[in-house]
């Protein structure tokens, strides 16, 4: 079972690459059958499919049966640009991988590529409990797009890295999220996504990390990497939309139930208490901060120097793009601040842009509460809270960032992170709602449907 790969990379003119991908494609489809959505093979799903850059746009919507979905390889159109930062400013971007940076580039691409299939694996079981056809369709949309992102990275490995690239591309299909022996590379991509609150938080926080990583790579000196990631960013925006509006709809629903009932323990009324939402936020925000890598990093400095990975919107920053002289005021684990050379703080700088972005999202959620006269406010925990990677790894502190003893932290965990008991109560609410236009009681309907279709559109047609 294979198909002609849609592409805008002139696949036909590169027989060697075509052959390599022809071997990889059936393995990919096998992986999708195993890890992708189950039991929907005969359903028709209203999906967006990327078709490259055309006058009519980059994607089209139609009903598709999953086994007939066609993943393609697309790069954003070339733009006139120079390398924008690091030790080679104003040089021409590279069309091939320079030998001296081959290892680093392969590592960057493999690490990004590994996250894409992981998401599909993590969401594998969610379809059976979708709160509406709208949400079910969005879940499938997200999964096929993560599949396409995997194609994007596998293409770079096959096209630019020869034999070891092919081996890495095979490995991307071999590792599995949460597998004890062959886990995904980054922790958050092995963490279980057990219910739809996890899933929306993942979209809000982990896919948003994806946005910042992709945006940094979109300015990379390696032009094909830049063009691939620029195209991926168009799809990533939707993933963050699903996550952010998903939690927003939960918060809205809870606020409505609180107002109508005058109670704040709304579990019994079929909604999710805000304190529980806050715990999910604490968990996924801290997981996602880990994805930026260590705050003080010689690797990040080397990547910046080489022009592989810069800051967020590096070329638009009115600043010294060599970053040779500056310092970064780093919040230290024991309290106080220390100055570290700017280049070593590139991960922290990218993360700072991310934190601001998350903060704006939280404001939109809190506006839902404010508008409904609910006093409770959601908040992001301190950057040092619950970390496993980097400067604050293993530090025991409260969500407000106050240092505490290991014992106090153990005590506090059940106040700050979701307990098994609470998870069970959330799980009890997760009953599928598959009637067009209907939504589960724990989540408000979205203001509008997909692609200008009405809310009661039959987004999934079961066979
Ligand atoms: Fe992705
Ligand atoms: Fe994503």
Image: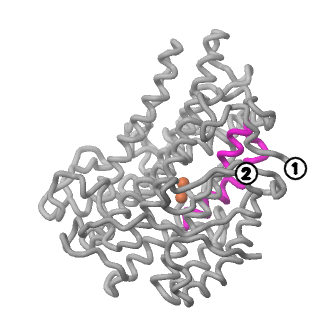
**Which badge, 2 or 1, comes first in the chain's sequence?**
2
Q: Is 122 above or below relative to 26?
A: above
Query: Which of the 4 image quadrants contains residue 145?
Result: bottom right
Residue 171 position in % (x across, y down): 60, 77
The part of the chain drawn in magenta is 114-139
Residue at the spot x=28%, y=67% of the render?
Answer: 80
Left or right of 214 in this view: 13: right
Residue 287 in sight in this render: no
Residue 259 in sight in this render: yes
Residue 230 position in % (x across, y down): 42, 60
Q: Verify CB contact (< 8 Å) between mark 2 and mark 1.
A: no
Given residues 182 and 100, the one toward you in this image is 100
Q: Spatial distance from mark 2 to mark 1, Cα to Cα?
A: 13 Å
**Which residue corresponds to mark 2?**
63
Ligand 1 image-quadrant field: bottom right
Q: Disc 2 beta carbon < 8 A from ligand 2? A: no
Secondary structure of the magenta portion, mostly?
helix
Given residues 130 and 421, the one toward you in this image is 130
Residue at the spot x=70%, y=48% of the render?
Answer: 46
For mark 1, give the secondary structure: loop
Q: Quadrant of the N terminus?
A: bottom right
Left or right of 461 in this view: 301: left
Pick out the residue farthest to the right.
Answer: 463
Given residues 335 and 252, the one toward you in this image is 252
Scheme of image coloration: one colour
Residue at the spot x=64%, y=38% of the render?
Answer: 419
**Which residue corresponds to mark 1?**
463
């Amino acid at each position: 079972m294979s198909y002609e790969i849609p592409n805008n990379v002139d696949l036909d003119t590169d027989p060697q690459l075509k052959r390599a991908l022809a071997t990889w494609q059936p393995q990919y489809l096998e992986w999708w059958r195993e890890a992708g959505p189950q039991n929907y093979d005969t359903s028709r799903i209203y999906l967006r499919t990327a078709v490259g850059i055309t006058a009519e746009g980059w994607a089209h919507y139609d009903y598709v049966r999953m086994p007939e979905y066609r993943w393609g390889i697309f790069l954003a159109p070339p733009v006139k640009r120079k390398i924008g930062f690091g030790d080679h400013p104003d040089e021409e971007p590279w069309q091939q991988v320079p030998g001296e940076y081959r290892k680093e580039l392969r590592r960057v691409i493999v690490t990004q590529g590994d996250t894409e299939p992981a998401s599909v694996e993590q969401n594998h079981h969610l379809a059976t409990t979708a709160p509406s056809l709208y949400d079910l369709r969005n879940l499938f949309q997200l999964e096929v797009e993560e599949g396409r992102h995997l194609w994007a990275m596998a293409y770079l490995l096959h096209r630019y890295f020869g034999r070891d690239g092919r081996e890495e591309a095979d490995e991307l299909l071999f590792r599995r999220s949460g597998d004890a022996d062959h886990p995904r590379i980054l922790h958050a991509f092995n963490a279980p996504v057990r219910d739809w609150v996890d899933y929306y938080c993942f979209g809000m926080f982990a896919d948003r990390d994806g946005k910042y990583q992709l945006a940094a790579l979109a300015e990379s000196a390696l032009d094909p990497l830049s063009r691939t990631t620029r195209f991926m960013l168009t799809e990533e925006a939707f993933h963050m939309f699903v996550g952010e509006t998903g939690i927003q709809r939960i918060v809205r629903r809870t606020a409505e139930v609180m107002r109508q009932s005058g109670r704040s323990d709304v579990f019994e009324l079929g909604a999710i208490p805000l304190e529980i939402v806050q715990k999910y936020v604490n968990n996924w925000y801290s997981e996602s901060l880990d994805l930026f890598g260590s705050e003080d990093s010689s690797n990040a400095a080397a990547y910046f120097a080489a022009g592989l990975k810069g800051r967020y919107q590096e070329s638009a920053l009115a600043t010294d793009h060599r970053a040779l002289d500056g310092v970064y005021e780093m919040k230290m684990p024991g309290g106080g601040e220390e100055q570290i050379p700017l280049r070593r703080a590139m991960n922290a700088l990218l993360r700072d842009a991310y934190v601001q972005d998350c903060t704006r999202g939280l404001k939109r959620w809190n506006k839902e509460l404010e508008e409904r006269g609910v006093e409770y406010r959601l908040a992001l925990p301190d950057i040092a809270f619950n970390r496993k990677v980097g400067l604050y790894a293993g530090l025991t502190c409260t969500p407000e960032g106050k240092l505490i003893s290991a014992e106090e932290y153990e005590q506090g965990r059940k106040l700050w992170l979701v307990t098994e008991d609470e998870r069970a109560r959330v799980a009890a609410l997760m009953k599928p709602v598959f009637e067009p236009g209907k939504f589960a009681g724990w989540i408000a309907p979205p203001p509008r449907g997909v692609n200008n279709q009405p809310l009661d559109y039959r987004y999934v047609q079961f066979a």
